[in-house]
Amino acid sequence: MTRIGLYPGTFDPITNGHSDIMGRAVKLVDKLVIGVAINAGKGPMFSLEERVEIIKAETAPLASAIEIDVQPYEGLTLQFARQIGATMIIRGLRAVADFEYEFQMTAMNQQLDREIETVFLMADPRHQAIASRLVKEIATLGGEVGKFVSPRVKEALLAKVRG
């Protein structure tokens, strides 16, 4: 049986923290689906198409180890997980606040489908403070984001900020 893992998020933009979780997630599954949430309500800086393309480029080095598929989705993450045949949802944790939210989500998902497990991966300590929201704010205010994102993402961020 192929172990398919789903790593969902808005990835606006993908950070070094996201990439770290993806790099460790590939060790747990035979196929990793990066689910890019459409979630227009969050007011993303990058379009859905831009986020998908950036993630594909960022995950290309990992694709030599296993199959990686980047797909947009809308609606309940659990429904998308069923649709793609995922046996696990992979979530990254940075701090206690993340755990409380993720704990509630996992409990609800277990009520909806007991066949799909949620696996938590702790962020590398170097990446625990990184949040896409903060990276966008730093870039918008002219700060240096090179510690938090790859050079490719930094370039894309700066292009957005400069307009």
Image (cartoon, rainbow, N blue to C red):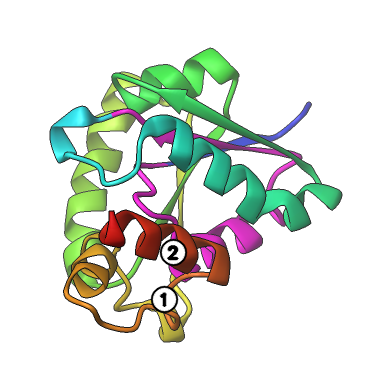
The quarter holding residue 126 reads bottom left
How many numbered marks have been drawn onto this rendered protein structure? 2
Query: Along the horizontal axis of the image, is 107 left or right of 59?
Result: left
Examine the rendered structure and indicate whether residue 61 appears above or below residue 80.
Answer: below
Q: What SS does tag 2 mark? A: loop
Kind of residue at badge 2 = Thr
Residue 5 visible in the picture: yes
Vertical order, 1 against 154 (above or below):
above
Residue 15: give its label.
Answer: 2
Q: Which residue is mark 1?
A: 148
What is the distance, in whole Å, between disc 2 and disc 1 at their CAs? 6 Å
Which residue is nearer to you in this view: 106 or 124?
A: 124
Quadrant of the rendered structure where residue 143 is?
bottom left
Q: Secondary structure at mark 1?
A: loop
Residue 148: give x, y in percent of width and height: 41, 76
Q: Residue furthest front?
A: 163
